[in-house]
Amino acid sequence: MKPILNLEVLEVLDAIERRGSFAKAAEELDRVTSAVSYTIQKLEEQLDIVIYRREGRRSVLTPAGRLLLEEGRHLLTAGNDLVNRAKEVATGWEPRLRIAVEALQVYPEFFRIVAEFLAEHPSMEIDIRESVLNGGWDALIQGQVDLLVAGPGPIPVNQGLRAEPLGTDSLLEVIAECHPCSHLAGDPEALKLQQSELRRVVLHDTSVVDVARSAGLGNEGRRFYVQTIEQKVEAILAGIGIGFVPLHRAAQHLESGRLLTLSNEPLQTQHYLAWKISNRGKGLQELCRRLLQNK
């Protein structure tokens, strides 16, 4: 059975309402007014409903006509999006990018750059997930994501990946001022003797294939595992244990005195933008170019 509704009919209905009359809609659609009137009349006959009623010299939408207009506009938008996406795919532009963003790092310009990218490519879908340590590399190698942002070194070898440095971050080993062993913050020799007795707050690695790394960055003592970097900071602030925290996450608490540093020298970590060499999607390449330009 041939469908009664099609996008052309919905375009006519939309034009009539936007332009305010059948005549102006016909002008926009490059048709004669009688052809526009016939399109609506035929649709009314096919659906067995009244779309327009006369009020004086004006034609006004009925409730059924209003429903057709409003829902039809959604279909027109979806149809246009579908056409645009098909054209992009045909020219090498993928319809969707899956991105893993490393939880421990900060990239303040990331969402601004993505917003600018989407403004120029509005039909592109972006799917972002958070990863920790090996988890992002794991997802990239397994084809679960197309791009890894701020993945920590070392870079997995012989996996067909391209990785470009994005920058470095400083990790500080910290303890809460309320922790019973907070006096160790000023005594590195005593810290070495007691470090194995201190509980470490550790962020779960999201890797499910590779050997997981611990985001506590230390192998001594007992562990307290958490799911997010926010939970890690709060657990350390509560005096549950010690741990390495990115400088940007610890700065305000160090300034207020709620956190104390256990080591004078921060640990410098390199992070990367990475993708599969075999992935030649134009969307991926364009977004990578923008991210690397603004690193």
Image: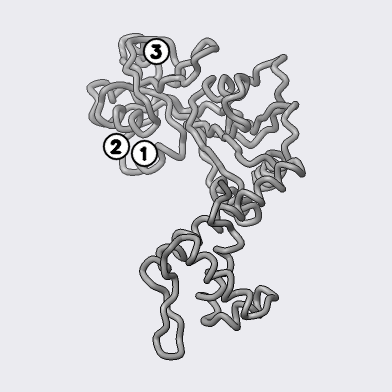
Looking at the image, what colour scheme do you see?
one colour
Indicate which disc residue 258 carries.
Answer: 2
Q: Quadrant of residue 257?
A: top left
Disc 2 and disc 1: Cα gap in Å?
6 Å
Q: Is residue 216 left or right of residue 84?
A: left
Q: Residues within 10 Å of mark 2 (few under 14, many from 20)?
A: some
**In the image, what residue type sits under mark 3?**
Lys
* CB atoms of marks 2 and 1 within 8 Å: yes
Judge the density around disc 1: few (<14), some (14-19), many (≥20) Cα neighbours within 10 Å: some
Task: Identify which residue, 278 or 268, lies in the foreground.
Answer: 278
The secondary structure type at the circle numbered 2 is loop
**Where's residue 19, x and y in %?**
55, 79
Structural crowding at the residue carrying mark 3, measured as other residues with C-alpha within 10 Å and reported as few (<14), some (14–19) or many (≥20):
few
Q: Secondary structure at mark 1?
A: helix
Tell me which residue sits at (39%, 25%) in the image.
262
Image: 62 above or below 131 = below
Measure the alpha-carbon separation of dots 3 and 2.
22 Å
Q: Badge 3 is on which residue?
A: 192
Disc number at residue 34?
A: none
The C terminus: image quadrant: top right
